[in-house]
Image (tube, rainbow, N blue to C red):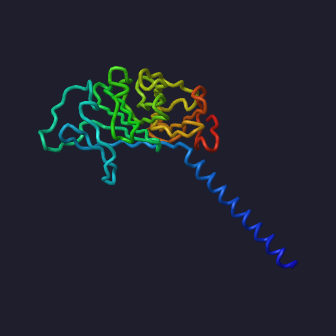
Amino acid sequence: FGKEKRMNKRGKTIMMLCLTVLLLGAYSVKAAGNTGYSTTLELTGMEKNGTFYLHYPSGELAASIPRELATSGFPASEPPAEGETASFPVSVFFGGNGKGLEWAVVCSGPSAGLCNTNVLLSKASGESWKLISSCENTPHELVTGAGFRDERTGFLSCRYTQDAGPVIYATQDGGSSWERLPVAEGYDGFSKTPGSPVMTAQSVWFPVVLRDEAGNETTVYYSSQDMETWSWGENDCRGGLGHP
């Protein structure tokens, strides 16, 4: 009887341990799903029958966008003949947040150091698109990265032009207006080119390429947890960012 009692007690302990492991596993999966990392790639594609087709480097189709919508307000260009395929005449920063929101930042070729940019969003995983910011109100900088936290909050990273940078614009009203982010002190003597942002539930951070007068390059990070205070760091925001 004593041995059976000990075995029952041991069985209950094992069951409790298994239940605990399952609960922790479920919590971890849920937490990972709520991390909210976003991804953005600069893609080119092909145009056919009035539609732009974007493909990943693997060849897989990423998105299709109506030409008329994507290049609204751009300088006129001759489309390929009906049924023919032509190279994509613009570059597109394409990405998504894993929750159905996708973005396509369509950039014309540069002219006198400037370019036209249209920003499109899809809340249906690319099934339909809406032009939220046209070349009339989007910053006319050379875009080097893009990303959205949600349908209202997004960023455009740009190549430095008039100053050392980083030049990063943000919208918090779904593309109706854009304002440049403040530039924190640090890394004087370098030009700074930001890339696409990485966003989590707690923070947003940009990889920034530093370039000195000799042409040497290195990458640091520019981050914020409240969209008000920005700081520099040499690793990434997960380990805590310190000033240079």
Residue furthest to the left: 81
Q: Quadrant of the C terminus?
A: top right
Expressed as whole percent of the image width and height from the top left, the position of residue 201 reads 58, 39
Q: What count of labels does the image hold?
A: 0
Q: Residue at x 15, y 32 (%)?
A: 78
Expressed as whole percent of the image width and height from the top left, the position of residue 3 reads 84, 79
Question: 180 and 83: which one is in front?
Answer: 83
Question: 79 and 242: which one is in front?
Answer: 79
State left or right for residue 240 relative to residue 181.
Answer: right
Expressed as whole percent of the image width and height from the top left, the position of residue 154 reads 46, 31
Question: 195 and 176: which one is in front?
Answer: 176
Q: Quadrant of residue 143?
A: top left
Q: Residue at x 76, y 71 (%)?
A: 11
Residue furthest to the right: 2
Expressed as whole percent of the image width and height from the top left, the position of residue 36 reads 53, 42
Q: Residue at x 34, y 49 (%)?
A: 56
State left or right for residue 66 relative to residue 5.
Answer: left
Q: Quadrant of the N terminus?
A: bottom right
State left or right for residue 56 relative to residue 239.
Answer: left
State left or right for residue 107 relative to residue 206.
Answer: left
Question: 224 and 114: which one is in front?
Answer: 224
Q: Residue at x 57, y 35 (%)?
A: 223
Q: Quadrant of residue 227?
A: top right
Q: Is residue 67 above or below residue 16?
A: above
